[in-house]
Image (cartoon, helix red, strand yellow):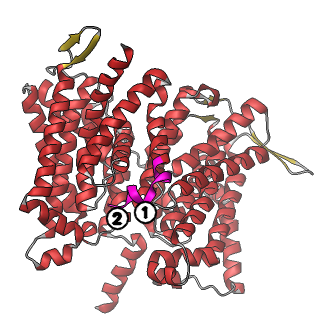
Amino acid sequence: MTVIDTSSPAPMSALRAAAVVVLIIVGFFMPRLLGGGSVAYSTLTTIAIFAVMCYGVDLVLSYLGEVSLGHTLFWAIGGYAAANLSVKYGLNGWSTALAAIALCIAAALFLGMVTLRTREFVFSLVTYAAAVVAYEIAFNWDAIGGSDGVVGIPALILPFGFATFSGLSQEDLWPVAFVLLLLTLGFIARFRRSKLGTTALMVQMNPALATSLGVDPRKIRLAVFVLSAPITGLAGWLYGYQRGYVGPDMFESYFLVLMLTAVVLVGRRILIGPLIGIALLIAQQNLLSLGGDWNKIILGSILAIVLILWPTGLVGLYRRFGKINSSK
Amino acid sequence: MNIAQQIINGIVLGSGYACIALGWTILLGVARLVNFAHGQLYMLGAFVAWYAITRLGLSYPLAIVVAALFLALLGALMQGAMMGLVMTQNLTSLMIVTLGLGYVIQGGSALIFGGNPHTFPGTLVRAKIDIGPLWFTWQDVLVLVVTLVLYGAVWWFTQKTRYGSVIRAVAEDSKLAGLFGINAQVVYLLVFMFECAAVAIGAALVAPRSPILTSMGFNEVIMTFVVVVVGGIGSIGGALAAGLGLGLFTAFFGAFVAHAYTTAAAFALMLVLLVVRPAGLAAK
């Protein structure tokens, strides 16, 4: 569709590269531009972390066209890996990140393999059930924190050989969150042009064509699902360090609804769509909050209304209005 | 004697699982639709029945009817809003929309009913029956009887009546059914209303066994998934058998292995079955 056509597979022009560099620089100094207070830093760090979390779901929902309801599981795996390994074994950030990635891939492989030969809604059903069941296990298993979770997560330590990064405050964590977001965006952009990315789109748009070309849609689903898990997992990993506490609340359906809403709000298959979506949603919750229960109603309603009324998201809505105006 | 008591507990639990899963079985099997707000609808059904008893002063049987009617109405509203997605069989969006609506129901219920646990008065939960060392309650008998009657009625309605064939025709090919003068929209609407009313009845019968909270419902969703998948998707007799079997499994697992991990064990059971017989279980 048109949304895909706009991202030309041709190499970036010099102008475009320059624009991207300027955007990255402006993005990095964004907390300064917003006043430089600790609220600006913590809000933008949260947005960056949550955006990375959403990109895991984005990969599955936008490019594969299937629904994973289990990404809170990977989100929590990242957090629990960071918490348990840093508190109990004093491991540094690189080790806990590697562990988070490995555990997420293992969990996604397991769930993907189990549902490999089933129909699509069974995949959604199993991923949803997996997250609920993992919550129950995390809640009852005292060795990994139990119902109290893990408190007192130390500062994020990232040794670089020549120097060691130590992130204790929100100001310190902002560069890490920003770099993680950039890496994720780069990865998604690369994925969109990759063979797997285009094949996944073909499976979604024209399954008959894909099958006739010898593509096994189920294997593509498994590959994309496994690829998406560590993205959300790394977001959970950083979230653990940011909050200094990890508990069973990471499994809450709030995160699941948030991920899905951020992806569909702006429009699927748009590179920076989830980032803008999550920024809008976090801004609503932080600046225009009406209390927890009302926020639930707002978030759930946005998700339902967007999919029912404007399935192409805000971008589709904008285009439709543009069309109406130009046809006058 | 512990074994005999666990068998009774299993049947008690299982009839509850089967009762709660009936609506999902019909929705998925007969209309090929899904509803991820199932757990929150269960919670809401329980709270509406509780509200009808404690605040409106209705009797328990009347409260069950009120809960069923209220949720049927809510189901009609939900399905009316989602009709575009239903008619295009957009299962991906339907899953997400129902999930979002479930989240709205959860937030709305917490606003209206508050965050405190409540207990049901006026039910048969305390009416205990002792047979030697074994015991169960009249509420358990009620759940079992209602479940069997509902399953029997639904099986007869979908398999033996003209209306049942109409519903199955719409599920098979809604456009073709339209050519024969069947209004598919009305059929989908009625099936979805039935799913909501059925889960309300299940909630009003099963939930009084323990205090109710607006955050509950997740456990029931997992058990419903297991019942539907293990029973063979859409099979009414299969769902009843799977419900009772799952009840026995969780009763024994909870009593002899680990009570805290019964849901996890039920989920593991479903995964094993999905690997062993994916086509047999997924195919209608």
Image quadrant assignment for residue A178: bottom right
Residue A299 visible in the current orientation: yes
Q: Which quadrant, please, contains the N terminus of chain A?
A: bottom left
Crowding at dot 1, Cα within 10 Å, few <14 / some 14-19 / many 20+, comes out as some
**Magenta region, residue range:** B273-284
Residue at 66% across, 46% down? A237
| Chain identifier of the residue bearing label 2 in the image | B
Queried whether the magenta region covers residue B282, the answer comes back as: yes
Instruction: Report the label total.
Output: 2
SS at mark 1 in the image: helix
Q: Looking at the picture, which amino acid does disc 2 mark?
A: Leu
- Residue that label 2 marks: B91
Magenta span dominant secondary structure: helix
Q: Nearer the viewer, residue A282 or B68?
A: B68
Crowding at dot 2, Cα within 10 Å, few <14 / some 14-19 / many 20+, comes out as some
Residue at 60% across, 65% down? A223
Q: Looking at the picture, which amino acid does disc 1 mark?
A: Glu
- Numbered label attached to residue A120: 1
* Residue B253, position as x, y percentages in the image: 45, 27
Q: Nearer the viewer, residue A124 or A176?
A: A124
Residue at 23% across, 53% down? B26
Q: Nearer the viewer, residue A219 or A314?
A: A219
